[in-house]
């Protein structure tokens, strides 16, 4: 286990060793006062006169040792904490680098609660091992071992008696480990689930209140919190009795030495002076032993946590090359593309089983350079998944996606991202100014270039109503702006990026009728002379497309222009009729409002 930790220590190993050395001296300072006490008692036993200067020296020595014990203990822990937090930094950076290589879709599926717990709670819990268990645990274990060796050299029979409490304590500790470990897995699973549920509950509070789902939502929230409580209490109730037993037994190092040792002295098998020395030394190591073994309950936890950290992001890394884009043109080809999500279920034996559910089946099409290709279909048909596969959210299970004849897996993500501007229905805005949020599209752009992109995206009215214009902060996740305003800013990003391929994944989903014309003008500016793929929920917006692809249950069932599909595709006819009905219903609703 320590080898795993030291993999992340690097140059901080020497700092850990230094803290262990200082803690060794600190613990030794805690043992020396008992030797001074023995010296005083032994003088009394021998009946010799104690000189005043000698007694002052012994008392002063005890005081100095206690001060040094506290001082060196603080210095050692200070050094170990610095090393520990540097190692935690290296560990988090290592996890972050690993996460960067994983499919983005996999990270989204895990959820923010899981990621937060992994990077904050699970990694942070290793601080106990690094800052305390190593320096304190090792120092408090080595010093008693040295003391025991010394005791056996003095009188092995009396020393053997002082070991009587250790076997009983070890037995109690073994029971604590065996019973506690069984409860540990469910406890950590419940903790992770509770984290995700709490974040989901808070993020979805607006929807919950609007649709009066407080009872149902709170029931899920309460269930997961209570499950965590129950698993935690079950774990603690199992471990605590054994922990209390060994904590009470272990320091009692004289439990057998005092009565039996006294009898040995009475029979002449041992000297009184040796008995007193053994008793003093036994008392000196009771607390260090308890402290050393007190860290052992963390070992099964830490083993589990280290394994969890190593396995939490355990999935195939995204297949990507190091090549720049080498395609001659910007045709996008999907060749027999099949894709499925990795899901978990519990089988009849209660075991977690991983399986793949295919959502895209052998899709073939070409989106030609300079043309607009629309993908339509019912909800869950695989439209957005096709778009995410193009921007390499996931690796395809079978087949390939290429741009200009170059497989996207052969390109680096940086090279691929230069070719594509991806605008989803819900774009994230950072808690920064509108200017900087747009500049993400091209970090090297000047302020004037950003403002020009914002004008093309029809964002000027957004600036005019804010106190600091384009320099106004948008709030956390852009909460100061409406959904339509956030979408126009995301379009300004894409315009500023000026990539040759544009993917619009239901980018106008949040737009209101009043801003629909502005969004259409912004999109016109964005897609001019580009290769465009549009995931559409409004069929009226894509009837002018060069090619329309119709998806149904993950399969491409028809393709062609609008008029052609209306004649030949039953699935497209259903979608179009539903769109017409929806539009007429909205018109009737508005007319009804006017008549009222």
Image (spheres, rainbow, N blue to C red):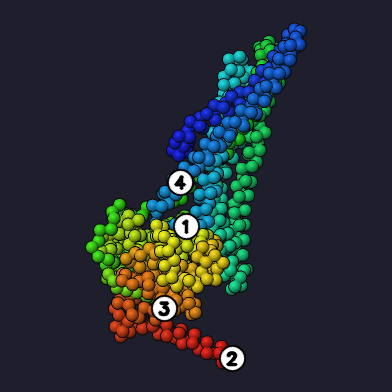
At label 1, counting other C-alpha atoms closer than 10 Å, the crowd grade (few under 14, some 14-19, many 20 or more) is few
**Is residue 217 among the parts visible in the rendering?**
yes
C-beta proximity under 8 Å, tags 3 and 2: no
Kindly identify which residue carries mark 3. 538
- Specify the quadrant of the image occupied by residue 156: top right
Kindly identify which residue carries mark 1. 110
Kindly identify which residue carries mark 4. 93
Query: In the rendering, at what x and y percent does residue 46 appear?
Result: 73, 8
Q: Is residue 384 above or below residue 569?
A: above
Which label's residue is closer to the chain start, 1 or 2? 1
Query: How far apart, in angstroms, are the residues tagged by discs 3 and 2?
Result: 28 Å
- Specify the quadrant of the image occupied by residue 494: bottom left
Residue 155, labelled with which disc?
none
- In this view, the residue farthest toward the bottom is 595
Q: Residue at 57%, 36% (x, y): give it.
A: 132
1 or 2: mark nearer the eye: 2
At label 4, counting other C-alpha atoms closer than 10 Å, the crowd grade (few under 14, some 14-19, many 20 or more) is some
Q: Residue at 63%, 49% (x, y): give it.
A: 233
Which label's residue is closer to the chain start, 4 or 2? 4
- In this view, the residue farthest toward the front is 448
Q: Is residue 284 left or right of residue 565?
A: right
SS at mark 1 in the image: helix
Q: Is residue 130 above or below residue 546?
A: above
Query: How far apart, in angstroms, are the residues tagged by discs 1 and 2?
Result: 49 Å
Query: In the rendering, at what x and y percent does residue 483 appear?
Result: 50, 70
């Amino acid at each position: 286990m320590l080898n795993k930790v030291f993999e992340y220590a690097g140059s901080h190993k020497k700092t850990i060793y230094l803290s262990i050395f200082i803690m060794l001296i600190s613990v030794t300072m805690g043992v020396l006062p008992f030797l001074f006490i023995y010296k005083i008692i032994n003088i009394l036993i021998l009946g010799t006169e104690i000189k005043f200067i000698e007694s002052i020296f012994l008392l002063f020595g005890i005081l100095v040792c206690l001060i040094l014990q506290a001082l060196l203990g603080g210095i050692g822990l200070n050094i170990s904490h610095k090393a520990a937090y540097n190692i935690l930094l290296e560990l988090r950076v290592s996890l972050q680098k690993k996460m960067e290589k994983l499919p983005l879709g996999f990270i989204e599926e895990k959820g923010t609660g899981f990621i937060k717990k992994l990077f904050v709670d699970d990694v942070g819990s290793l601080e106990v091992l690094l800052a305390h268990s190593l320096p304190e645990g090792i120092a408090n274990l080595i010093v008693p071992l040295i003391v025991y060796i010394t005791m056996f050299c003095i009188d092995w029979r009396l020393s053997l008696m002082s070991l009587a409490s250790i076997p009983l304590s070890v037995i109690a500790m073994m029971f604590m480990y065996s019973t506690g470990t069984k409860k540990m897995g469910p406890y950590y699973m419940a903790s992770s689930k509770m984290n995700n549920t709490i974040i989901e509950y808070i993020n979805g509070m607006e929807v919950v209140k609007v649709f009066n789902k407080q009872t149902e939502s709170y029931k899920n929230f309460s269930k997961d919190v209570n499950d965590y409580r129950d698993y935690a209490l079950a774990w603690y109730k199992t471990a605590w009795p054994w922990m209390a037993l060994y904590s009470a037994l272990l320091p009692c190092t004289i439990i057998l030495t005092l009565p039996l040792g006294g009898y040995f002295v009475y029979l002449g098998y041992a000297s009184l002076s040796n008995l007193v020395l053994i008793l003093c030394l036994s008392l000196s190591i009771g607390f260090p032993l308890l402290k050393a073994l007190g860290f052992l309950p963390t070992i099964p936890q830490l083993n589990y946590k280290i394994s969890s950290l190593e396995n939490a992001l355990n999935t195939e890394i995204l297949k990507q090359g190091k090549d720049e884009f080498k395609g001659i043109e910007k045709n996008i080809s999907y060749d027999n593309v099949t894709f499925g999500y990795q899901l978990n279920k519990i089988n009849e034996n209660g075991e977690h089983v991983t399986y793949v559910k295919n959502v895209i089946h052998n899709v073939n099409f070409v989106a030609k350079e300079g043309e607009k290709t629309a993908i339509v279909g019912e909800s869950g048909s695989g439209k957005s998944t096709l778009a995410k596969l193009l921007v390499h959210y996931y690796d395809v299970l079978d087949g390939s996606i290429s741009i200009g004849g170059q497989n996207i897996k052969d390109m680096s993500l940086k090279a691929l991202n230069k070719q594509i501007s991806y605008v989803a229905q819900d774009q994230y805005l950072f808690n920064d100014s509108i200017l900087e949020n747009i500049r993400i599209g091209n970090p090297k752009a000047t302020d004037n270039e950003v403002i020009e992109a914002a004008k093309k995206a029809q964002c000027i009215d957004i600036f005019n109503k804010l106190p600091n214009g384009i320099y106004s902060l948008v709030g956390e996740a852009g909460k100061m702006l409406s959904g339509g305003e956030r979408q126009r800013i995301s379009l300004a990003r894409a315009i500023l990026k000026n990539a040759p391929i544009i993917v619009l994944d239901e980018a106008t989903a949040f737009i209101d009728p009043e801003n629909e014309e502005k969004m259409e003008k912004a999109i016109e500016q964005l897609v001019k002379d580009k290769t465009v793929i549009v995931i559409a929920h409004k069929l009226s917006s894509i009837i002018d497309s060069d090619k329309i692809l119709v998806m149904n249950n993950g399969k491409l069932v028809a393709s062609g222009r609008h008029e052609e599909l209306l004649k030949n595709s039953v699935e497209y006819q259903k979608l179009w009729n539903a769109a017409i009905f929806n539009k007429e219903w909205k018109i009737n609703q508005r007319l009804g409002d006017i008549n009222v």
